[in-house]
Image (spheres, grey):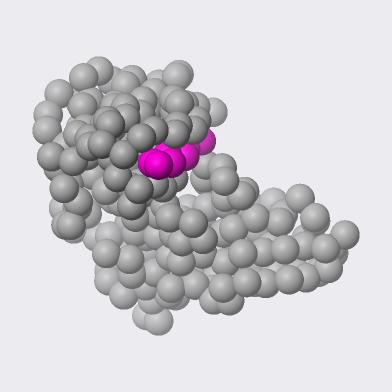
């Protein structure tokens, strides 16, 4: 079942601005991952943060994880028009039967205007 | 990087026919593959977990007799939508993971997806 909720559902910004997307989940997790999907295409893995990590950086991406609040945020700095896409968080649940299974959030549609 | 392909990229079929979708890991051996379905403007829903050489594990609410999954080799998994109906029209995406060492989590590598339209 879907447990991730993301906000905002849609975000529209100008090039150069920062974009912040949030994700909340309900159960214990091993890790949380962020993916990007261009319209009608497959998913591209952006970054993975483990449950014992609080913050991670990769290029213009910064991800935070607060397991006490069961939430994560993805920050894209200095956005570009090419960043326009849907962004999904996905959690891998803790526990043997959840191994490797990802539960996706509803996604945030990001539009970056030139 | 790891590459996963899907074939076909899009398919249109008549109601009642069966459609087979292939998922291949091109440059690595995938012991586990996952099949997802995505309806327009919605998120991905996990349908089943496919392990090489064993029966697939289906998520609650997914009919195993309708969505047949075969994972006969370490580089190929197939999803067959049997007796397809218009409500089966969707975007089907597979992902694959490499074999893991104990305590090592592997990223899922996603295929480009297959758009199915049932008329």
Magenta segment, prevailing SS (helix, strand or loop): strand
Where is residue B36? Give x, y as percent. Answer: 35, 46
Q: Is residue B76 left or right of residue A41?
A: left
* Quadrant where the C terminus of chain A is found in the figure: bottom right
Whether the magenta-drawn stretch holds residue A31 is answered as: no
Q: Kindly identify the residue that appears in the image at 33 percent across and 52 percent down.
A: B87
Does residue B85 lie above or below A107 as drawn? above
Where is residue B85? Give x, y as percent. Answer: 30, 45
Where is residue B48? Give x, y as percent. Answer: 23, 44
Q: Kindly identify the residue that appears in the image at 76 percent across and 50 percent down.
A: A82
Q: Kindly identify the residue that appears in the image at 41 percent across and 47 percent down.
A: B90
Q: Is residue B95 visible?
A: no
Where is residue B25? Give x, y as percent. Answer: 40, 24
Does residue B5 lie above or below A8 as drawn? above
Query: Which stretch did the figure color magenta?
Result: B112-119
Number of marks in the rendered image: 0
Q: Is residue B106 left or right of residue A42?
A: left
């Amino acid at each position: 079942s879907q447990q991730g909720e993301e906000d905002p559902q849609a975000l529209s910004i100008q090039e150069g601005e920062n974009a912040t997307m949030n994700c909340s989940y309900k159960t214990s997790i091993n890790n949380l991952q962020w993916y990007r999907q261009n319209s009608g295409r497959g998913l591209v893995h952006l970054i993975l943060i483990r449950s014992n990590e609080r913050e991670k950086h990769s290029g213009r991406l910064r991800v935070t994880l607060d397991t006490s609040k069961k939430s994560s945020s993805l920050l894209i700095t200095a956005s570009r028009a090419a960043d326009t896409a849907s962004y999904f968080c996905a959690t891998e649940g803790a526990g043997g039967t959840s191994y490797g299974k990802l539960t996706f959030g509803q996604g945030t549609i990001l539009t970056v205007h030139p | 990087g790891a590459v996963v392909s899907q074939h076909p990229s899009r398919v249109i079929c008549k109601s009642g026919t069966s459609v087979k979708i292939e998922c291949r890991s091109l440059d690595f051996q995938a012991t586990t593959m996952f099949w997802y379905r995505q309806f327009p403007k919605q998120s991905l829903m996990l349908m089943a977990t496919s392990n090489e050489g064993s029966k697939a594990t289906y998520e609650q609410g997914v009919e195993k007799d309708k969505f047949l999954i075969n994972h006969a080799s370490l580089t190929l998994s197939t999803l067959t939508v049997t007796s397809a109906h218009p409500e089966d029209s969707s975007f089907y995406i597979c992902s694959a993971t490499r074999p893991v060492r104990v305590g090592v989590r592997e990223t899922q590598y996603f295929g480009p997806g297959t758009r199915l339209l049932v008329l």
